[in-house]
Image (cartoon, rainbow, N blue to C red):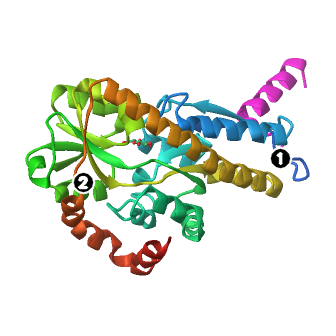
Amino acid sequence: MTFSRTLMAACTAAAAFAWGATLPTPSQAQTMTLKAADVHPAGYPNVVAIEHMGKKLEEATKGRIKLQMFPGSVLGGEKEMIEQTQVGAIQILRTSLGPIGPVVPEVNVFNMPFVFRDEAHMRAVIDGPIGQEMLDKITASPAKLVGLGWMDGGSRSLYTKKPVRTPADLKGMKIRMMGNPLFVDTMNAMGGNGISMGYGEVFTAIQTGVVDGAENNPPTLFTANHYQAGAKYYTQTNHLIIPEIFVMSKVTWDKLSKDDQALVKKFSREAQMEQRALWDKSVADYTAKLKAAGVEFINIDNKPFYDATAPVRAKYGADYATLIKRIEATK
Ligand code: BDP
């Protein structure tokens, strides 16, 4: 073999293991750089917690496993990123649980309106056995995703160009919802017209009047600038308390040694707890920033919205009555 052929062979081998795997001798642990992705910008609690998890992995494996974060939707919207994670092009994805629903229908129990009493209740559920079972369901499903851990996505409330206080006020208003029929049904039940749309299109849609508003938590409303597109009324409906999730591509997971898998699990649990502390602080900070920017927070009695969405819970919860009872019984 000539020198250049040897070089070519080496380059091909390097390309084949471009994301870092060494030649797969079973006794030798893997070297890899995990590509992690998030729609949120650098500095957002979820992004910071995953980056920190990467640092811990790097330290514990003496640099064998590294993590590179791609924040701010640079790798696409959540639907596209879920697909990329399924095929192994993204190794760790932090996403809302919302767009996981169409891929793993069981998770829709956590996506139902008002299924959690409040954020403390949601946290108790995700930290306990039900949270673990749900991660395991995702892992065991054919989706090719491994559920690593949960994050707090706070409570989602409405933000609109005109003030809303009751379901009747939503009549005729087009409200952007995440890509999952459950959310369109939720908004329709709440009195508006739910429009399913990717997160990256919401700013322009509000600005041009394609929609009259959207719904999200204060940190997202602030960092996505949607209030600057004209949605200045934030009505505290708290209709969805959706935990966020971070998953690993099954393609990647299967390449990890048992020891490395255990490390990833350990640091995932720590990331779940760390994000929460960052989250609480960010909600307070961004709420203050939104108020300073002129966003009007409207406090309402959200019972009429709870009552209006009963048919959505009945429809999507029908197959999970026992699980829902266990959620309700969680203190
Ligand atoms: C944010 C979630 C993010 C979603 C976004 C959305 O953190 O994962 O993509 O909402 O509404 O709260 O699409």
| Residue 140, placed above or below residue 298 | below
Q: In the image, residue 73 lies at what x, y percent?
A: 46, 31
Secondary structure beneath label 2 = helix
| Residue 325, placed above or below residue 226 | below
Main SS of residues in magenta = helix
Rendered image: mark on residue 184: 2
Q: In the image, residue 318 lies at what x, y percent?
A: 33, 77
**Can residue 330 be spotted in the picture?**
yes
Residue for badge 1: 24
**Is 8 part of what is drawn in magenta?**
yes
**Can residue 224 be spotted in the picture?**
no
Q: Amino acid at mark 2?
A: Val
Region in magenta: 1-23
- Find the distance from the CA under tag 2 to the CA under tag 1: 46 Å
Q: Earlier in the sequence, mark 2 or mark 1?
A: 1
Q: Amino acid at mark 1?
A: Pro
Examine the image and state in which quarter residue 105 appears.
bottom left
Q: In the image, residue 30 lies at what x, y percent?
A: 81, 44
